[in-house]
Structure formats: structure tokens, C-alpha cells
Amino acid sequence: MKISSIFCVAGMLTALAAGSAAAEDARTLSIVDDRGATVEVAASPKRIASISYLATDVALALGIKPIATTYMTKGRDPDFLLGLTKDMKQIGQRAKPNLELLSEAKPDVIVSMKRYTVGNAAQLEKIAPYVAYNMELLSESYQEVADLSNLFGNPERGAELNAAFKKDLEDFSAKAPKGAHPRFVIMWGGDIPFAFHTENTTASIVTAVGGDNIAGPMTPGGTFGLEISLETMLEKDPEVIFVYDSGPDRPHENNPIWQQLSAVKNHRVHYVGDQWVEANGPIGREIVLREAAHYLYPDTFPAVDVRKEAAKLIPATLQN
């Protein structure tokens, strides 16, 4: 082959490769989010912003570090994410994201909790494509993980993570003591605690391993939780209580009824980490499963080292 022909072929291959790369960069995905909105998003975005920890959780499990995230409690970088949020731009508390800081981060996509951002949708959409999910129920978690894994360029890994969790849920349920169904409640603390119905992600997981949720199932068309007075809680008398740990202020403990609860008397009140609040991602839900099993059946399942479990799911390339 003549040298000129070789250069011609090489040039054609280079052009084809460049064209393929450009096409990949230009490729977009359509996502129908939980608002019912169809959002066009560039495939494999490089700059991910997460309002709530769902997108942070999924991205880290795929080996991607988001550029911005909200927090649950200021200054607390969750162990279930190996503290890696400290390297991301903090854009406020998840219920009150700071849109100015978010804009400064220049994200390619914003993944958010619907109920905290739907009122600001128009403003968010001016910053970047905005995708909103409920992030409330275990039944929603699988689709959320699948959607985001596809968007972030690794649908196969998303499918693996969903399949692995479903198997783990079955395995832990099979190993739980037969006939033992400890009564439990999962709650935010307060003068009147807010408890979660069985379909809520963490309550679904605890129920799957044998727990009996005193808050019961959702009513048709109802919400995922309800206020439950301590008087009502005493009537139902949970044996295990999970409290979302939002800081040192614990007004429910000042009510004398609190001390009458069986879980309190038997030292089975557990102030649980941010993975219990944000459990719809692949890392959070796996750790909640292991913690739930231990807290319900401490003689059957071992205590959980949260960071050790997280390290199994976050690629070593991202770990500090």
C-alpha cells in the first residue's frame, strides 16, 4: 500500500473515531421522573449534583464522585458514604438547597427529592436538567437505581446491585428466627414523633426480616408516614425503636411516657445514621438491611461496621 493511501486510511479512522466520540457526547437520554415530567439529559454526565443522597449513593457505587450534594446535618459526612461527601461542594440542607451554591457548581444534571424541590422546578431547570424522584418507598428504589445507573453510563452495574439486594433481602429473611416478630417503630423524634408506614423503605426492610411495624401499612392514596403520639405508642408498645438521629435535641425523651416504653426499658432504642433516612440507594439499603437484622435479632446477626460494609460497595479508586 502506498504511503499516501496509508495516511488516507489513518485519517479516515481518526475521523470516524472522533465522530463516534462526538456522537457519544451528544447522546441524550429521556427520563420520566416522579413529577411525570420527561427530562432530556446528556448521557454519562460528568458533573452530578445531588439534592438528597440518592444520586450520591448511586454514583459512588458506580465509581463516580458527584461534584455537589446536600447534607442531612451540617458538618456530618455520613459513614455509609465513607465520608466522601467532604470532597463535594455542600449546597445546603436537603430540605432547603441553596440554589446559588448549586448554580456555582455548574452541574450537568441535578437529581433531587421531589417533595423538597418541586416548588423550585423552574429555577432548577435554568441551572441544569432536573430529575425528581420520591425516594420514599422500597418499591421505588429499584427503578431509581436502574434509571440513575443508566443515566450515569453503567446500567449493567445497576442491574447487578438491584439483583444482589433482592437476594440479600431473601437470605436475611430466611435466616431470621422463625416465629419471632418484634414490634418496632421507625420515627423522627419530636414532641409528637413522626413514624413511617410499612411501605417506606426502611420499614419495608425491617418488616422483610420479620419485624412487625406498629405504624402499619399506608392507606390507599395516603402518605408514607404519620404523627403518632407517645400515648398511642405506649398502647402499641414497640419492642425496638429506631430514631432518625438529627442531632442532640431529643424532646420526645422529656415526656414521662417515653420511659414507660418496653424498648426504652430494655435499652433497645437505636439512634440510627443517615443511611436510614436516605435508604433508597444501593449502599444505604444494604447497610440498613444488616443493621435491621442485628437490632431485631442481636443473638443471630452480628453488629455492623458501617464503614466496612460501605467499603465493599464503593470502588477502591474512590476511597480515601
Image (tube, rainbow, N blue to C red):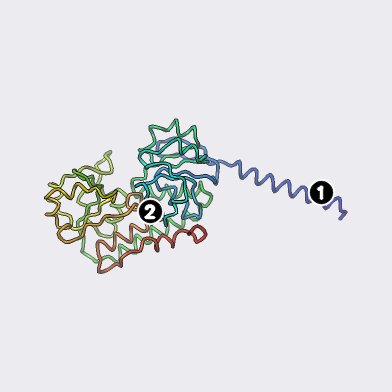
Name the residue: 40% across, 32% down. 120
- Mark 1, Cα crowd under 10 Å, few <14 / some 14-19 / many 20+, is few
Name the residue: 49% across, 54% down. 62
The amino acid sitting under disc 2 is Pro
> Vertical placement of 100 versus 66: above or below?
above
In x, y percent, where is residue 213?
22, 52
In x, y percent, where is residue 139?
35, 49
> Vertical placement of 101 versus 310: above or below?
above
The residue closer to the viewer here, 178 or 204, is 204
Residue 96 located left or right of residue 48 = left
Name the residue: 40% across, 36% down. 35
Tag shown at residue 8: 1
Residue 78 located left or right of residue 293 = right
In x, y percent, where is residue 211?
24, 57
CA–CA distance in space, label 2 to label 1: 55 Å
Q: Which residue is identified by label 2?
A: 78
Tag shown at residue 172: none
The amino acid sitting under disc 1 is Cys
- Mark 2, Cα crowd under 10 Å, few <14 / some 14-19 / many 20+, is many
> Vertical placement of 1 versus 23: above or below?
below
